[in-house]
Image (cartoon, grey):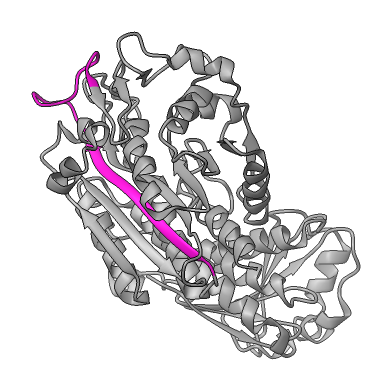
């Protein structure tokens, strides 16, 4: 379910809403601009602040119930030290949206001191992100006992006129992330390659974009043996999906966003352990990130050309599956020795990356839940970032930081290339036990069109969470939607 966001100005004390979230930084005086609201609450807000019941710390929240005029409830939310104002507002608004949804109010509002410009964007995006919920498969209680979902929210800005563009961007970012998180959360028997293709077509229809979908027959005609090797064990039709957004000048080279779309990864013949295998429905998070980013970019009408490319299938064990020891030839002519069928994402991306040459991209960024080694190296707080162009790597890292999806660079030294040098073919699909994230990226580099700047994002640790993250519940995070969009915005300016 979407959320309707609106923008308004004025005194927060006069906002008639079931819930008003008030975000305040730590270590500051109670704002004079809240005096009318505080008076309506009998001074309870300033007393809570003065007595230390609410200190304004990050993720701190205190709910107060009012007398009935203006906001029925006030939720004080902490901004922390407020050094990164955009990030602090985004996080506080996310927490506010989540708590508003949990309270069962249909509508809420969000206010913070001097909320204007890009801070309004952060607030709109944050509330949308926090209010997102997935209840499609839950049996709901009787209507009288059912909590009301949060369906609308108002951002109360200090300067409405100066904030309209930023507000619209925040709404677009929120909707893009909702597309991605819904795809991620759907079970593998629903979110099939055909479902992802249908979602791409829906986005294309909504924004008048060109969408091309190739099935098994066309993929075979394109000589994508690497991609087809992964799809060999499933009766589901694999899909190569291309979405073209043309917001820039005619003839300008596009940005290519490439996503891994493994709707379920059993590991194939090299089958995974049973425990935790259900999380492998998230192996299509790179594809979800591409589609979510295209949705946001199209809504924002960015003046840049973008092409999204997705390789989608499932990796299943069967009598027709690829086997360890098989050799296949990718569409760029390189031969691959398959030593482990669970290193399948790179086999799909190899042919998709090679195919991107058709569009002569200015830069390629791919995203994939590619290696468990990245989770070991960086945990769940940072995305692994690698590439063939240091300048582009820095540009992507900056975009990721702006979007609140921090990344960390890993080396791509040629010494590591020896670990995937083939014994009977050009290249092996796995190296040794060490440096697994780096050797996976080096494998992908073999299929990047010659001379094209490229960056790989390993989102294995950041695309979804197996625990509650306070502002985001267990499940999909929407990474790397913001990284993709912020990169495109940087190129559009």
Q: Does 30 appear above or below 452?
A: below
Check if residue 317 falls in the magenta segment. Answer: yes
Residue sitting at 47 percent across and 13 percent down?
A: 419
Residue sitting at 53 percent across and 52 percent down?
A: 472
Q: Does 334 appear above or below 4?
A: above
Q: Nearer the viewer, residue 379 or 430?
A: 430
Q: Position of residue 375 (x, y in %)?
A: 52, 29
Q: Nearer the viewer, residue 111 or 342?
A: 342
Quarter the C terminus occupies: bottom right
Q: Position of residue 443 (x, y in %)?
A: 43, 27
Residue sitting at 89 percent across and 58 percent down?
A: 27
Region rendered in magenta: 304-327
In the shown orientation, is residue 402 left or right of residue 219? right
- Is residue 46 something one can see in this rendering? yes
Check if residue 88 falls in the magenta segment. Answer: no
Q: Nearer the viewer, residue 454 or 116?
A: 454
Q: Does 77 appear above or below 264?
A: below
- Is residue 282 something one can see in this rendering? no
Residue sitting at 44 percent across and 70 percent down?
A: 246
Q: Position of residue 402 (x, y in %)?
A: 67, 56
Q: Nearer the viewer, residue 486 or 115?
A: 486
């Amino acid at each position: 379910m979407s959320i309707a966001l609106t923008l308004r100005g004025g005194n927060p004390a006069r906002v008639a809403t079931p819930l008003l979230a008030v975000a305040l930084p730590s270590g500051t005086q109670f704002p004079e601009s809240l005096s009318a609201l505080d008076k309506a609450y009998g001074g309870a807000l300033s007393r809570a602040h003065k007595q230390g019941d609410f200190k304004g710390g990050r993720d701190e929240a205190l709910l107060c119930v009012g007398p009935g005029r203006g906001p029925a409830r006030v939720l004080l939310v902490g901004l922390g030290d407020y050094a990164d104002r955009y990030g602090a507002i985004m996080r506080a608004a996310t927490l506010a949206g989540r708590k508003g949804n949990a309270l069962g109010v249909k509508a809420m509002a969000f206010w913070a001191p001097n909320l204007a410009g890009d801070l309004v964007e952060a607030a709109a995006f944050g509330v949308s992100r926090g209010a997102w919920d997935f209840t499609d498969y839950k049996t709901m209680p009787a209507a009288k006992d059912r909590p009301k979902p949060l369906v609308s929210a108002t951002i109360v800005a200090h300067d409405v006129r100066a904030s309209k563009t930023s507000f619209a961007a925040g709404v677009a970012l929120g909707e893009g992330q909702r597309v991605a998180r819904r795809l991620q959360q759907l079970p593998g028997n629903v979110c099939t390659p055909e479902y992802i293709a249908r979602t791409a077509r829906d986005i294309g229809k909504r924004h008048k974009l060109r969408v091309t979908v190739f099935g098994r027959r066309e993929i075979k005609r394109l000589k994508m043996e690497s991609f087809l090797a992964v799809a060999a064990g499933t009766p589901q039709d694999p899909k190569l999906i291309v979405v073209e957004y043309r917001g820039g000048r005619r003839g300008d080279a596009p940005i290519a966003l490439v996503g891994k779309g493994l709707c379920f990864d059993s590991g194939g013949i090299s089958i995974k352990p049973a425990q935790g295998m259900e999380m492998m429905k998230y192996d299509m998070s790179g594809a979800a990130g591409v589609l979510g980013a295209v949705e946001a970019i199209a809504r924002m009408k960015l003046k840049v050309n973008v092409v999204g490319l997705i390789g989608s299938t499932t990796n299943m064990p069967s009598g027709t599956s690829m086997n360890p020891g098989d050799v296949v030839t990718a569409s760029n002519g390189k031969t691959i020795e398959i030593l482990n069928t669970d290193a399948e994402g790179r086999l799909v991306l190899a042919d998709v990356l090679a195919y991107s040459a058709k569009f002569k991209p200015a830069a390629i960024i791919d995203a994939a839940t590619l290696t468990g080694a990245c989770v070991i190296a960086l945990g769940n707080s940072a995305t692994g970032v690698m590439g063939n162009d240091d300048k582009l790597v820095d540009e992507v890292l900056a975009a990721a930081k702006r979007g609140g999806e921090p990344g960390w660079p890993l080396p791509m030294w040629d010494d590591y290339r020896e670990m995937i040098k083939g014994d009977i073919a050009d290249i092996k699909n796995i190296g040794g036990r060490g440096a697994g994230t780096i050797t996976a990226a080096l494998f992908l580099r073999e299929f990047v069109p010659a001379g094209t700047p490229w960056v790989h994002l390993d989102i294995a640790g950041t695309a979804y969470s197996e625990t509650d993250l306070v502002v985001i519940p267990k499940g999909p995070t929407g990474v790397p939607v913001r990284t993709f969009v912020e990169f495109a915005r940087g190129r559009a300016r």
